[in-house]
């Protein structure tokens, strides 16, 4: 009897490098548009943006510009993760 094959992690060294590069580019853009933030604060914002499905799908500079444009609205929108399931049952 053979053992089931283990699934390989989708997180390859290249993916980790790409994520690190995305975060660094995002952090740099955040600091360019909001110089009053510290590098640590900009890194926290970049990580938060990377965890958002919507902004993570964008180039980092475009993601920062998008968030800045949204935050300049009179009533800034809420940035939430999309629901993973169907409509709530009740």
Image (cartoon, rainbow, N blue to C red):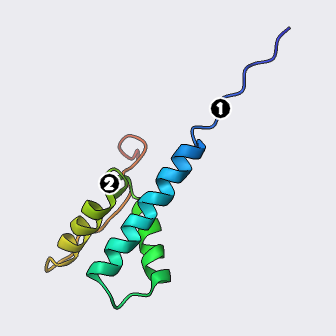
Question: Is 8 drawn above or below residue 34 in the view shown?
Answer: above
| Residue in the image at 42% along x and 78% along y | 42
Query: In the displayed structure, does residue 57 sit left or right of residue 73?
Result: right
Residue 7 visible, this angle? yes
Q: Nearer the viewer, mark 2 or mark 1?
A: 1
Element under label 1? loop
| Residue in the image at 30% along x and 55% along y | 59
Location of residue 82 in the rendering, given as x and y in whole percent from the top left corner: 36, 51
Which residue does the numbered mark 2 point to in the structure image? 54
Which residue does the numbered mark 1 point to in the structure image? 8
* Image quadrant assignment for residue 30: bottom left
| Residue in the image at 37% along x and 67% along y | 26
Location of residue 56 in the rendering, given as x and y in whole percent from the top left corner: 37, 55
Closest to the observer, 2 or 21 = 21
Residue 48 visible, this angle? no
Location of residue 13 in the rendering, given as x and y in whole percent from the top left corner: 59, 45
Element under label 2? helix
Question: Is 26 drawn above or below residue 17 in the view shown?
Answer: below
Residue 84 badge:
none
Closest to the observer, 14 or 83 = 14
Query: In the displayed structure, does residue 33 sit left or right of residue 12?
Result: left
Q: Are marks 2 and 1 in contact (CB under 8 Å)?
A: no
Query: In the displayed structure, does residue 3 sit left or right of residue 81?
Result: right
Quadrant occupied by the N terminus: top right
Count of marks overlaid on the render? 2
Closest to the observer, 39 or 44 = 39
Q: CA distance from mark 2 to mark 1?
A: 26 Å
- Farthest-out residue, right: 1
Question: Is 26 drawn above or below residue 54 in the view shown?
Answer: below
Query: In the displayed structure, does residue 14 sit left or right of residue 69?
Result: right
- Farthest-out residue, left: 74
């Amino acid at each position: 009897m053979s053992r089931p094959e283990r699934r390989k992690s989708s997180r390859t060294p290249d993916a980790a490098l790409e994520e690190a590069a995305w975060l660094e580019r995002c952090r740099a853009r955040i600091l360019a548009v909001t110089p009053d933030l510290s590098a640590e604060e900009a890194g926290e914002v970049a990580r938060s943006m990377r965890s958002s499905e919507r902004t993570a799908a964008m180039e980092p500079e475009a993601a920062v510009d998008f968030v800045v444009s949204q935050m300049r609205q009179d009533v800034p929108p809420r940035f939430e993760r999309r629901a993973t399931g169907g409509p709530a049952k009740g």
